[in-house]
Amino acid sequence: MSPVPTGPVDRTLLPLTARVGDDGRLSIGGYDVVELAETHGTPLFVYDEAHLRAACRDAVEAWGDGVAYATKAFLCVAMARLAHEEGMCLDVSTGGELHVALTAGVPADRLVLHGNNKSTDELAAALSVGVGRIVVDSFDEIDRIEALVADPPALEGGPEDGGPVVRWRPKVLARITPGVEVHTHEFVRTGQEDSKFGFGLASGAATRAVERLAALDAAGVVEFVGIHAHLGSQVFALEPFVQAIDVLAEFFAPLGLPELVVGGGLGVAYVNGEEAPPMAQWAGSVLRACAKAGIPDSVRVTAEPGRSIVAAAGVTLYRVGTVKDVPGHRTYVSVDGGMSDNPRPVLYGSGYEAFLPRESGADRPVPIRLVGKHCETGDVVVAEGFVPDDLAVGDVLCTPVTGAYGHSMASNYNKVPRPAVVFVADGEARTVVRRETFDDLVRLDG
Ligand code: LLP
């Protein structure tokens, strides 16, 4: 809950290079935000490139080499390239994410393949290019990897035609569900025993998986390098991570493996008054817990942050289309996007702030509900928002902290074209994903 609900948006929710001019106008990356909306249209995802780069560098500094950006949070060619340039590995969890990362030119050995239901084709694609790690999630997947390595399919553009090097002995980690529950929305909680992900510790599945992978390692089929666990997402408390290490360490230590990955999950502040631990504190807690639990220094302990890299680097710009007072109830402010570019409020009841970038420092005394243009009542962007009293139709409205799981979860519901994405830096804005057109909406139709 915001301590001053009617005050301006907290500066800490805005990207690193956000500045408020004497006239109250907001700029990001040296670019006036209202002008960005004029030039590039709305809705628009705007990312502060310096913020993205700083967040990646922080992650590498905190965790060391091997820390992977979880691309599901936000992925396009430019983002994949940026994370790679700043020294991060990339976690990809589908053939599609793998394709985008490879298209961006990220070397395959810097990629980590995830997924609870990797298809044979996805595994073959990953093996053929030589992804750095595969995080194994089920016994069916172990069967598939074993079969593929024993009898590799002929690959178009394989090494015989001068194609990529085939790595048919993958480095693998086993994904374990440690049975630690975290306080976050149940849809994004993953560390508990009752989960579609990974191998449960309590059921003995984890032990059986490890035995199988060790046997495959001995047979030269895979290189079994480590254990992986991911507890959940948008986790504010560091305690569950520490608790998970205690549980994992007991299982991990006797295996003598060189790698331990604690997944992603670090929470971020979305609304005024919220506070989340910084990357270094998260890493520090986990690494200390590992040392305390007797995990040797030689073990590479690392993580896969997604949200904490990109969320606060991005804002969404909308244009206000209608303002409707419903006497005795509330005022509805409708914008030109909604649940198609930000489904998080509908899915998880997530809260956001909204403000006018033409007067970013202004108080926001007027309670409103910010809604989208989709044909359902649930299409809410900010359920209980506050705006300045001079908000008017035609205004550009900004919702901060929309850089994670917004664009990546966007849809074409109601055939609304997906927004463009721009990166801003040093007074320049470059379109990294162009806005969809109406023609794009029929491009796939037969
Ligand atoms: N590693 C694994 C194996 C994951 O499943 C995830 C997220 C991450 C890393 C990155 O977690 P992060 O640091 O971003 O919390 N759509 C939801 C979040 C789903 C997270 C899924 N897995 C949301 O909008 O809140």
Image (spheres, rainbow, N blue to C red):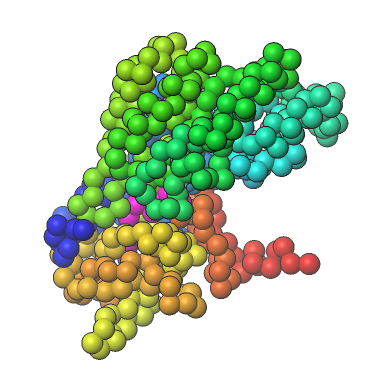
Q: Quadrant of the N terminus?
A: bottom left
In this picture, residue 63 sits left or right of residue 226:
left
Q: Can residue 37 be seen in this view?
A: no
Q: Quadrant of residue 77?
A: top right
> Looking at the rendering, in which quadrant would you find the C terminus?
bottom right
Q: Nearer the viewer, residue 129 or 388?
A: 129
Q: In this picture, is 64 found above or below 352? A: above
Left or right of 169: which side holds 347? left
Kindly identify the residue that appears in the image at 31 percent across and 59 percent down.
352
User: Residue 444 sits in which quadrant?
Assistant: bottom right
* Residue 399: x %, y % from top left: 33, 59
Query: Which region shows up in magenta?
Result: 397-405
Residue in the image at 34% along x and 52% along y: 401
Residue at 21 percent of width and 63 percent of height: 359
Q: Position of residue 341 (x, y in %)?
A: 47, 61
Q: Judge by depth and name the residue closer to the eye, 150 or 81.
A: 150
